[in-house]
Image (cartoon, rainbow, N blue to C red):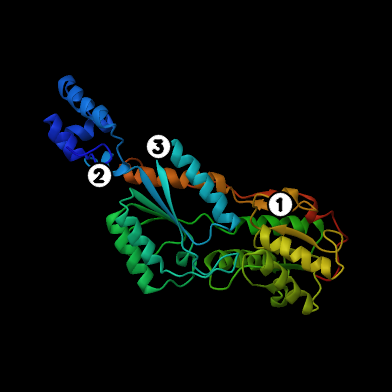
Amino acid sequence: MAGKEHITITQIAKESNVSISTVSRVLTGNAVVSPEKRKRVEEVIRKYNFTPSALARGMVSKKTKTLGVILPDISNPYFSSMFLEIERFALEAGYTILLCNTLFGGSSHGIRNTKEEAYYFQMMIDKQVDGVMIIGGQVDLVVVEDSYKQALKQLSEQLPVVVIGKKIEDVDCIFIQPETGMGVTTALNYFYMLGHRNIAFVGGQTNVTITEIRLNAYKTALEAMGIAVDEQLISLSDYYLEDGYTAMNTLLSRKHKFSAFLAINDSVALGAQLALYDQSLRVPEDVAVISCDQFLTGEYQIPRLASINQHHDILGRLVISTLINAINGTGEPVQFSFTPELIIRESCGQPIAISSNK
């Protein structure tokens, strides 16, 4: 008989004179086994000091209690905070997480992606995870490549898949798009109340859905306030600190007056503030700022950063619940109805004198 380091469920079943399914039921505790058979199986398990793998426990149920998470950049605070919440809730529900950091589009460290996302989709199938969550990557683009659609479709045909992003037609995943632009509207209304009429928009990347949604909300809100949209007050770049710095320098070089700006997220806001500082401009005394997406450290900056809390913690918990429900075939997809919250801090400043020239 094989030593304890090589013992398998099949060998345990043979030595116990029971079926493989009986051994699996003993290991998982999910079904009734007669006391006599249970005793025989447990004696063999103790004899070989057998510790079942997740795959072994799932031989009958076809479940490994493992979930896959695919995201583009774990160093990005948005993705890291979301992942931490997902992992916490998954562990509470008895699942472990297999994380794939694809580096789609690069990372905050300048690392470029080396594998197509389809490679990671196949990895999830090969690892026999119970379900997959996709957060960002190519699905965030306004126009998604046909090859990506096909790969995602093939993945969804074999595993339950939840995607945080816009719906892709003819792909049988559960799509959840929490971004509506409501946070941008809230921030602009607050700036308007403080007396600001020349409000810029900084950061974000073209052809990315979240940028398009927030930029459209910015333009729509300005028009509703009777303020003409000045394209020279829009400076896009990307989503990291250095992008905020670059975007703000571009904005300042245009010499168009502005007293406040919205940043696509906290990282961009902080980079933009440094660019202002290098030009001897102070926040909030000379320029006020509100971030459209709060991360974890804005409260500890100088000045403290006013931000929109998009409630990523709640989103992470609700999305993982939706995936587990899909795996178990129970319940409907969780409904998302929470509202972005403006967190007022020092960077948005005090009321200013309202200019007669809008």
Can you say which quadrant of the picture contains the C terminus?
Answer: bottom right
Dot 3 surroundings within 10 Å: few (below 14), some, or many (20 or more)? Answer: few
Could you tell me which residue is drawn at 69 percent across and 66 percent down? Answer: 222
Image quarter of the N terminus: top left
Q: Which residue is mark 2?
A: 62
Give me the residue at 38% from left, 61% from top.
120
Circle 1 or circle 3, nearest the eye: 3
Q: Is residue 325 left or right of residue 277?
A: left
Q: CA distance from mark 1 to mark 3?
A: 33 Å
Residue at (57% x, 58% y) in the render? 75
- The residue singled out by tag 3 in the image is 94
For the residue pair 86 and 284, the one nearer the viewer reads as 86
Which of the pair 95/225 is nearer the observer?
95
**Marks 1/2: CA–CA distance:** 44 Å
Q: Position of residue 194 (x, y in %)?
A: 81, 56
Instruction: Mark yes or no: residue 9 visible.
Output: yes
- Residue 186's x, y, as percent? 67, 55
Amino acid tagged 3: Gly
Up-down: is 143 above or below 196? below
